[in-house]
Image (spheres, grey):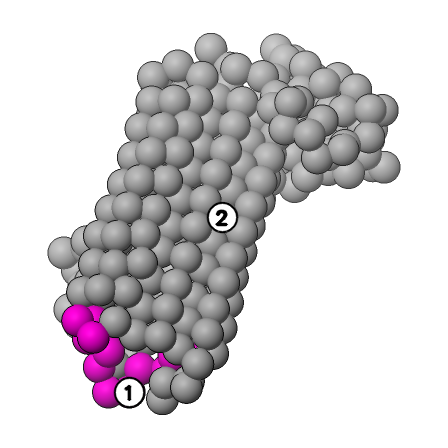
Amino acid sequence: MIAKSTIIHPTAIVEDGAIIGDDCRIGAYCVVGADVVLGRGVELLNHVSVSGLTSIGDGTKIWPFASIGSQPQDLKFSGEKTRLEIGANNMIREYVTMNPGTAGGGGLTRVGDGNLFMMMVHVGHDCMVGNNIVFANSVALGGHAVIGDNAVIGGLAGIHQFCRIGQGAMIGTGASVVNDVIPYGSVVSPRGSLGGLNLVGLKRRGADKDAMNGLRAAYKVLFGQEGTLMERANSLSDDMPDNPLVQDVLEFVLAASERSICTPD
């Protein structure tokens, strides 16, 4: 079903069965598969491929040569029906690739709203990507990675499969992240180690000054020398119950995970 208000270039291919919302624009040489759903005002500039069980939310714009919804890069994948869900108002630049989920990972890759994916970003199978995140050029997300809201991932950074990046974290250019990164953390060095807190990001979003001061104090305790990390986290949970930033970090640290926590050098 194609809305009457949609504009499709004569060289584009839209397969029977695709659902195209109002006011979409599908440019030259785009290919849209039979199981694709485009929301209102989605724009595919030109030479964009969208395939598989893929839905794209209202107002998302995709630049040339992006490949969205093609088969996961997983040797265990055997053609099962899995999905890719992309939210609203995303900007997906040239050569970005996004893969659907796998049966072993829950069958779903999900991308939230308002994200910027710069050129050549890869979103692997079964990833869960939040909202208002910036992915600089050539970032690669391994399968099952989880990226929290408002994170910033620097160019050429690699996120290991199953890693969690907490909300508001900053990952430096070229970092290789192999462990979970706490909310508001700042990762530096080629072999990603925690280099402090992303206080600049918190200030830009209008975080409370007292809450940030409390977060600084909690950071020093959490990554101190006395006891284990989990013991220190449990102690802080009782000491700062009313600081939402601290509680975000502690909830993240204490949650079950496939990876350990990224720590300072």
Does 218 sit left or right of 164 as displayed?
A: right
> Residue 119 appears in which quarter of the rendering?
top left
* Mark earlier in primary sequence (1, 2): 1
Residue type (three-letter) at the residue carrying disc 2: Asn
Please tell me which residue lies in front, 26 or 77: 26
The residue shown at (65%, 41%) is 251
| Above or below, 242 relative to 264 | below
| Above or below, 84 relative to 184 | below
* Residue 105 coordinates in the image, percent (x, y): 34, 60
Q: Which mark is residue 115?
A: 2
Check disc 1 and report the residue beneath it.
17
What is the secondary structure assignment of the residue under circle 1?
loop
Please tell me which residue lies in front, 153 or 232: 153
In the picture, the quarter occupied by the N terminus is: bottom left
Q: Main secondary structure of the magenta part?
A: loop
The residue shown at (66%, 22%) is 199
Please tell me which residue lies in front, 62 or 120: 62
Residue type (three-letter) at the residue carrying disc 1: Gly
* Residue 146 coordinates in the image, percent (x, y): 46, 47
Q: Which residues are magenta?
A: 10-21
